Amino acid sequence: MNASWKNLRADFPILDQRINGQPLVYLDNAATTQKPRCVIDALVRYYERDNANVHRGIHTLSIRATAAYEAARERSAKFLNAGSPAEIVFTAGTTDSINLVAHAWGDENLKKGDVILLTEMEHHSNMVPWQLLARRTGAKLRYLPIVPGDTGLLDLDQLSSVLTPEVKIFAFTHVSNTLGVINPAADLCAAAKKVGALTVIDAAQSAGHLPLDTRAIGCDFLAVSGHKMCGPTGVGVLYGRAPLLDNMPPYRGGGSMISSVEYFESKWAPAPAKFEAGTPNIADVIGLATAMDYLDGLGREAIARHDEKLAAHAYARMATEVPGIRMLGPAQHRSGVISFALPGAHAHDVVTLADRDGIALRGGHHCNQPLMRKLGLPSTARASFYLYNTEAEIERLIASLQKIQKFFAE
Ligand code: C6P
């Protein structure tokens, strides 16, 4: 993979277009990232040359497709520094991965009186599956709060009072999709281990943005979405420690996940096949592995530095050059996600007006309704940066926000 920071924008064909007469400034990367040419080519090549079902056929195309699919599992294991490819389950994305754990691990292991610990900044995807699990098992939900104010940092002083021995599972986001906060994942996992709780990390906003080493972090499960890291939509990864996956029952039944089937009962295949019922999303899994090659070609440390530098610069300029703006999340040591509110302007109006200037933002509750209520806001506008964004685009953003602010001030 010849990914290079030089002329990187040329790798992303979609960026080369005008929106409402202006060159596109794509700042909605927390919702989904754009795809480099190599990922698009990998999808086309697969469908043009290799398309066949996997793990079934013994003809050449099926052998080729199976080899590419399983090579993608090895690639994913390396990307996350998993102990082995058997710890990688392909899923539809972060939401699907978390639901898998909540069902397969949760239904089997939780009971009345147990506690599921979450944080106040969780995306609905890392909240609702646990609410449903609590309803099914009688377990209770508990939340680690964020500190008062707008930095959105977790209140770690309260960790020991909420992370008690009744907590059986602690599920938290690595990076907040609204606040841009980067949580201390390794410390949280170490604290959970001390009370015997398992950990589930929502890595939707960190995979592909930061170096991510599941063994150094010490988590039990970690959920990833391919589309937020230059890969295709509808594909993702669940990392699970081998002994846990081995002891969990399947989540869905069907072809491919069995070792034998009788009319009245069946035996399961070992993990990870046990969790991949039916024909998988073969092409997109292969596209995701290509995205991993692309990102590692650039270097995840370098991507993290680029995101943080742009975000810190944008945050400082927005805070000082857009009158009345309310900035959320920390000013520094943050991810590329910046949420803000302009006085008197609904976030949707901010996004619509920015779009007239060719700038793609997101406005709304960002699937963080309880967090919005906590912040006392109905919604925020959000600019989220990634590897192809530039300082020149920050100039365009600031100019547009100043115009929008003026419009609502008049
Ligand atoms: N956040 C955003 O605009 P899926 O939809 O399964 O790929 O990812 C869900 C998800 C889970 N956790 C976090 C922290 C997320 O940010 C997301 C997706 C998008 O912020 C869509 S709401």
Image (spheres, grey):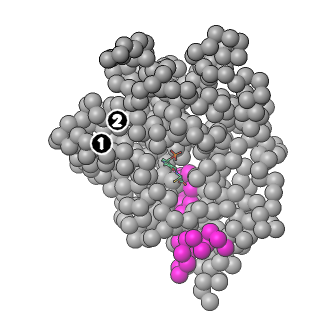
Q: Residue furthest top?
A: 58
Q: Earlier in the sequence, mark 1 or mark 2?
A: 2
Q: Residues within 10 Å of mark 1 (few under 14, many from 20)?
A: many
Cβ–Cβ under 8 Å for marks 1 and 2: yes
Q: Which residue is mark 1?
A: 133
Q: Residue furthest left?
A: 113
Asked if residue 280 lies in the magenta stretch, the reply is no
- What stretch of residues is rendered in magenta? 330-353
Q: Position of residue 378 (x, y in %)?
A: 45, 70
Q: Which residue is mark 2?
A: 103
Q: Is residue 211 above or below residue 405?
A: above
Q: Residue at x 35, y 16 (%)?
A: 263
Q: Is residue 360 left or right of residue 319?
A: right
Q: Residue at x 58, y 15 (%)?
A: 56
- Nearer to the camera, 103 or 386: 103
Residue type at mark 1 is: Leu
Q: Position of residue 192 (x, y in %)?
A: 31, 37
Q: Quadrant of the C terminus?
A: bottom right
Q: Position of residue 182 (x, y in %)?
A: 49, 49
Give the Cα separation between the discs numbered 1 and 2. Answer: 7 Å
Q: Is residue 202 left or right of residue 38?
A: left
- Nearer to the camera, 208 or 36: 36
Q: Secondary structure at mark 1?
A: helix
Which quadrant of the figure has residue 295? top right
Asked if residue 335 lies in the magenta stretch, the reply is yes
Q: Secondary structure at mark 2?
A: helix
Residue type at mark 2 is: His
Q: Quadrant of the N terminus?
A: top right
Which quadrant of the figure has residue 260? top left
Q: Residue furthest bottom?
A: 410
Q: Is residue 389 above or below residue 22?
A: above
Q: Residue at x 43, y 48 (%)?
A: 125
